């Protein structure tokens, strides 16, 4: 994961449909570099077989059933006459496609070898640190050196395979470009054909660089380690990643550091236009040996940062702490943090909170609250919130505001205007006061909230998607277009991910179901979340990310405001392995920032973009 990996685009629709492929990243696992090195000569031999078989007619012959015979197979002349001899254009197309598949194979294999090598090296270095035997340490160090040499040789071989395929494809495409139209020209991956006065020409799709035959994502759109740690230090393992974007593409990533007794840490930085990210060293925001479970972070347009967390997984106290980003005019200190003191604001916590900015210097923290029973009053579980002023590094609570008189968990929220937001939650069912036999499930609840002066105001009549269904787990909510939101969630009963669309009345702010929830993916995902306006405001799309069967996935749909429906939905693998913790935030201009940990707990990030074909 630390090495540049091969980005590839999926979801390439037919020309003119306006479908959106992603700049995606293959980060799967394969055998070690030594295993790949031993099989490389066989792979090159396979290329020779593919090239010799580069004929549509022969491909048809090979697909027919044959009987085993001691004599070599002879061409079926009757079948050739029936199918027809391949034209020059068909043969050239088949050959170029074969070369393209071989090139993709080499690129993907090279990337996966890099990932496996990094994981093997991490294991070896951990074994060196834990071993007390100097002889064992020496043997392990020699293994690291040997593996590094094998990786270099394997990388060189795969690079030669990629260069050979690309060069031959360039030569063949150059020979067919002049005088042919797009219907006869085969472009490379991530490229589209354009007819010019000189003939057909392949042009890289939006977001990609290179020639028409070898378009690829910019180097900055590849995965990178979140922390720059040397080889001789203990590698950080993290969980509960959370990222936010604010103030001219500034970013803040918070996480629980498992290698440092579960303390909370933050990394701040800035994402440049091309995707390059400048990151600061991590800073601890918890005091002493304090822990940080499910930390959440937000940044304001004024450059203030607010973090909220609980100090125990169950029965924890919730804390918040503010910081000012920047050196207050000091040159070269634009990533410095000036901290305020941590303050408590609730107790008996066991669930993740939600946080979002409002206005220029305020934030709203939403959480599940409790009041213990007394001899005279019963205990209560309810939804609560605080409005926080963050003008300085020391946050001040302006007020507390209940938004529900029933238990709520799995809180998520997204802004719909500068001071308004929509809250998504899993809530307890409600019983009709007039008829006790009538109950409403609030497993997929949505509620409108707004800051009015120094108060938080909530609509007392929430919207409930699927009011008859229970066991709705992870969820995400996002803004698609003005007064239009998407709500995606994991249906635990049917083991599927569903998505519906919610409309907001611009005058009354009442929520209504615009599109009934539909099944988007069949299977279980431990997380489901969404990104608001993932492409551009003028071309609305939905995007939710989840865990697939073997990889980390995103689902992208286009939104048709006139027909009031979403369509052209496609699923893409952006990480060819599972991630134990994932958090995303929109950067703008079709780009998104994803912070994640591998299954081993190593923190990484990647910038990916959506591009129209």
Image (spheres, helix red, strand yellow):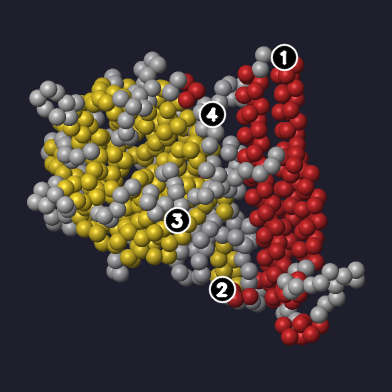
Residue ID for mark 4: 228
Question: Which residue does the image show at 24% across and 59% down from the upper left?
Answer: 513
Question: Which residue does the image show at 85% across and 72% down from the upper left?
Answer: 73
Q: Are marks 2 and 1 in contact (CB under 8 Å)?
A: no
Quadrant of the image containing the N terminus: top right
Residue ID for mark 1: 134
Looking at the rendered image, the disc whose residue lies closer to the viewer, 2 or 1, is: 1
Residue ID for mark 2: 195
* Disc number placed over residue 522 in the picture, else none: 3
Residue placed furthest toward the right: 71
Looking at the rendered image, the disc whose residue lies closer to the viewer, 1 or 3, is: 3
Question: Which residue does the image show at 24% across and 43% down from the upper left?
Answer: 428
The image shows residue 89 at horizontal and vertical percentages of 69, 76
Q: Are marks 4 and 3 in contact (CB under 8 Å)?
A: no
Report, in whole angstroms, how far the alpha carbon at label 2 lies from the one at label 1.
67 Å
Q: Crowding near pointer 1: few (<14 within 10 Å), some, many (20+)? A: few
Q: Crowding near pointer 4: few (<14 within 10 Å), some, many (20+)? A: few
Looking at the rendered image, the disc whose residue lies closer to the viewer, 2 or 3, is: 3
Q: Crowding near pointer 3: few (<14 within 10 Å), some, many (20+)? A: some
Say whether residue 558 is left or right of residue 12: left
Report, in whole angstroms, how far the alpha carbon at label 1 lies from the one at label 3.
52 Å
- In depth, the one of 370 and 205 nearer the eye is 370
Question: Which residue does the image show at 56% across and 22% down from the upper left?
Answer: 234
């Amino acid at each position: 994961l630390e090495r540049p990996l091969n980005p590839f685009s999926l979801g390439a629709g037919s020309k003119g449909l306006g479908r959106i492929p992603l700049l995606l990243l293959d980060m799967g696992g394969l055998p070690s570099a030594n295993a790949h090195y031993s099989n490389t000569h066989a792979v090159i031999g396979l290329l020779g077989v593919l090239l010799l078989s580069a004929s549509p007619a022969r491909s048809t012959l090979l697909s027919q059933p044959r009987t085993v015979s001691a004599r070599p197979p002879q061409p079926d002349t009757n079948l050739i006459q029936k199918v027809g001899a391949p034209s020059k254009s068909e043969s050239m197309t088949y050959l170029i496609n074969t070369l393209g598949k071989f090139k993709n194979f080499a690129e993907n294999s090279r990337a996966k070898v890099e990932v496996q090598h990094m994981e093997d090296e991490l294991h070896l270095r951990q074994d060196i640190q834990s071993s007390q035997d100097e002889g064992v340490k020496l043997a392990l160090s020699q293994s690291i050196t040997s593996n590094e040499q094998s990786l270099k040789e394997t990388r060189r071989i795969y690079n030669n395979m990629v260069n050979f395929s690309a060069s031959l494809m360039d030569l063949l495409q150059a020979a067919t470009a002049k005088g042919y139209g797009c219907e006869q020209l085969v472009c490379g991956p991530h490229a589209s054909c354009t007819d010019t006065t000189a003939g057909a020409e392949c042009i890289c799709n939006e977001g990609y660089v290179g020639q028409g035959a070898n378009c690829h994502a910019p180097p900055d759109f590849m995965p990178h380690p979140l922390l720059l740690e040397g080889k001789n230090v203990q590698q950080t393992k993290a969980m509960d990643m959370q990222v936010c974007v604010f103030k001219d593409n500034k970013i803040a990533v918070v996480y629980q550091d498992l290698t440092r007794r579960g303390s909370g840490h933050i990394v701040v930085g800035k994402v440049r236009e091309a995707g390059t990210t400048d990151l600061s060293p991590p800073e601890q925001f918890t005091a002493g040996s304090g822990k940080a479970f499910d930390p959440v972070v937000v940044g304001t347009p004024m450059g203030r940062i607010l973090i909220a967390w609980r100090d125990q997984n169950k029965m924890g106290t919730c804390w918040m702490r503010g910081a000012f980003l920047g050196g207050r005019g000091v040159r070269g200190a634009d990533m410095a943090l000036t901290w305020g003191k941590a303050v408590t604001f609730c107790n008996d916590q066991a669930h993740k909170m939600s946080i979002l900015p409002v206005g220029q210097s305020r934030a709203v923290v939403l959480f599940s609250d409790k009041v213990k029973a007394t001899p005279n009053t019963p205990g209560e579980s309810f939804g609560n919130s605080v409005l926080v002023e963050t003008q300085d590094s020391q946050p001040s609570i302006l007020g507390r505001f209940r938004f529900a008189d029933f238990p709520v968990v799995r809180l998520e929220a997204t802004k719909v205007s500068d001071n308004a937001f929509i809250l998504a939650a899993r809530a307890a069912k409600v019983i009709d006061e007039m008829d006790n036999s009538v109950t409403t499930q609030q497993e997929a609840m949505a509620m409108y909230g707004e800051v009015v002066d120094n108060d938080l105001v909530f609509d007392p009549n929430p919207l409930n998607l699927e009011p008859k269904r229970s066991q709705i787990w992870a969820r995400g909510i996002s803004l698609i277009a003005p007064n239009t939101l998407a709500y995606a969630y994991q249906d635990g009963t049917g083991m599927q991910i569903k998505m519906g669309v919610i409309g907001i009345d611009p005058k009354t702010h009442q929520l209504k179901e615009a599109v009934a929830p539909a099944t988007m993916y069949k299977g279980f995902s431990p997380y489901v979340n969404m990104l608001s306006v993932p492409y551009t405001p003028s071309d609305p799309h939905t995007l939710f990310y989840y865990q697939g069967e073997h990889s980390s996935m995103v689902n992208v749909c286009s939104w048709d405001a006139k027909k009031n429906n979403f369509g052209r939905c496609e699923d893409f693998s952006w990480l060819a392995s599972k991630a134990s913790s994932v958090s995303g935030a929109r950067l703008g201009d079709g780009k998104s920032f994803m912070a994640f940990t591998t299954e081993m707990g190593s923190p990484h990030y990647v910038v990916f973009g959506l591009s129209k074909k």
